Image: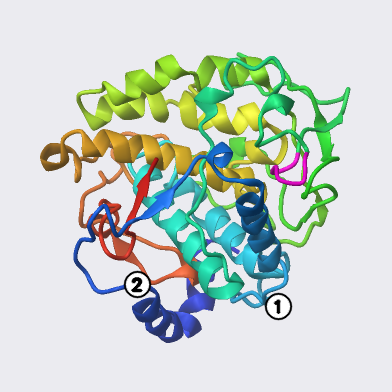
Amino acid sequence: MGRFLLRQVISLYVLIISAISCLAFPAAGSCSPEEAVTRKEWRELDNLQRREYIDAIRCLRKRPSVLPNEEFPGVRDRLDDFIATHINYTNTIHNNGLLLPWHRHFLTLWGKTLRQECGYKGGLPYWNWALDAGLLSLSQSPVFDGSGSSLSGNGLYDPAERPICNTEGECLPRGTGGGCVYSGPFENFTVHMGPFNSSLAQPYSPLPPNAFAYNPHCLTRSLNPPLLASMNNQTLVDQMQSAETITEFLAVMEPSDENSLGSHGGGHHGVGGTMVDLFTSPQDPVFILHHGMIDRMWTQWQNQDVVNRRYALNGTTVIYDPPGAPPVTLDTVVEFGPLDIPRKVREIMDPLDRKYCYRYT
């Protein structure tokens, strides 16, 4: 069941979604920085604020899905609507010109759903990985320390975990876990879809077989401090912020070369386990915080020169930017399955647009 079947299935919901979207997103225009909701780094939140965010994620597990379970067996709740949507568009929103704008809107839809359906009142948190890149153990980070106000810790050590290798035979060092997350709020947290080998994500490729099949299994992690230190350190953050063009920015954040990680891939592999699955990585609660940091980096880069950078784009609409792939333009239309109506890229470029209205600390 590929992208086109998903589009057919959700066609019945388009009118409903359009009506909801009109209510969820304010009229066009800009908000002032003073009006904007502040997105804070996880360690800037107090324990109560962290637990409120954790509780809101748990709430999604209790909410009914929009996608029908008969057609999408793995979709069992509202959280799974987000997972299925990410699976469906994986081959068009990574290592190309759509990574930044598509995920910006995806995060906003996540935040609005938490507020409207689960009563969450805060801004979306982010994880500044550069603050943790020098740690010998990521269990020292408040994101991963396994406490009740963390996003849980490492997975159980699995001696059989194999290193991940690219098509040139270069392998990443294995992490320090590999098994089920065993501490904190997401201990024994069951995820419903995947796992899939990320090598299945290729230009113009179909979705993995049984992409939306029900396969309950535990959330896994394999925290990898050396890898995070090499790909998500402050030097690379500074390099992104000093980039003169969006092309230079993306060369550090998300190279289109299949064999290069960038800071985006470094964050995923630095957490390991479920986060390494390019298709179903949003099943790990840290996914949103990781992409919040990515969006923060992009937002800060845009804000340095709004006139020339707010609408700067580079890349194509196909994973790994293969030759001949359609270039991303401001008129490129992106889809969000059951989460929202299709949007033009130009609608997604400004965090102070009224349908977003957020800023970062």
SS type, badge 1: loop
| Residue 172 in sight here | no
Tell me residue 126's x, y (percent): 51, 42
Q: Amino acid at mark 1?
A: Glu
Earlier residue among tags 1 and 2: 2
At 77% from the left edge and 40% from the top edge, which residue is drawn? 147
Find numbered disc 2 in the image and state the secondary structure of the residue it sits on.
Answer: loop
Residue type of the residue flagged with mark 2: Phe
Say which of 248 and 327 sits in front: 248
Query: Where residue 32 sits: x, y (%)?
Result: 22, 57
Left or right of 22? Residue 159 is right
Q: Is residue 226 left or right of residue 342?
A: right
Q: Is residue 134 left or right of residue 272?
A: left
Position of residue 163 measured from the top left corner of the image (x, y, whole percent): 72, 21
Task: Estimate how packed mark 2 is, as few (under 14), some (14 to 19) or many (20 or more) residues with alpha carbons within 10 Å.
Answer: few
Region in magenta: 147-152
Quarter of the image where the C terminus is located: top left
At x 48%, y 69%, the residue is: 339
Q: Where does label 2 land, which residue?
A: 25
- The residue indicated by pointer 1 is 70
253 vs 139, nearest the viewer: 139
Colour logic: rainbow
The answer to whether 210 is drawn above or below residue 218 in the figure is below
Please say whether residue 149 is one of the residues in the magenta stretch. Answer: yes
Instruction: Name the quarter where the N terminus is drawn.
Output: bottom right
Give the Cα distance between marks 1 and 2: 30 Å
The image position of residue 316, as x and y in percent, is 31, 42
Q: Main secondary structure of the magenta part?
A: loop
Task: Give above or below for 137 relative to 115.
Answer: above
- Which residue is painted at 34% across and 79% down in the image? 22
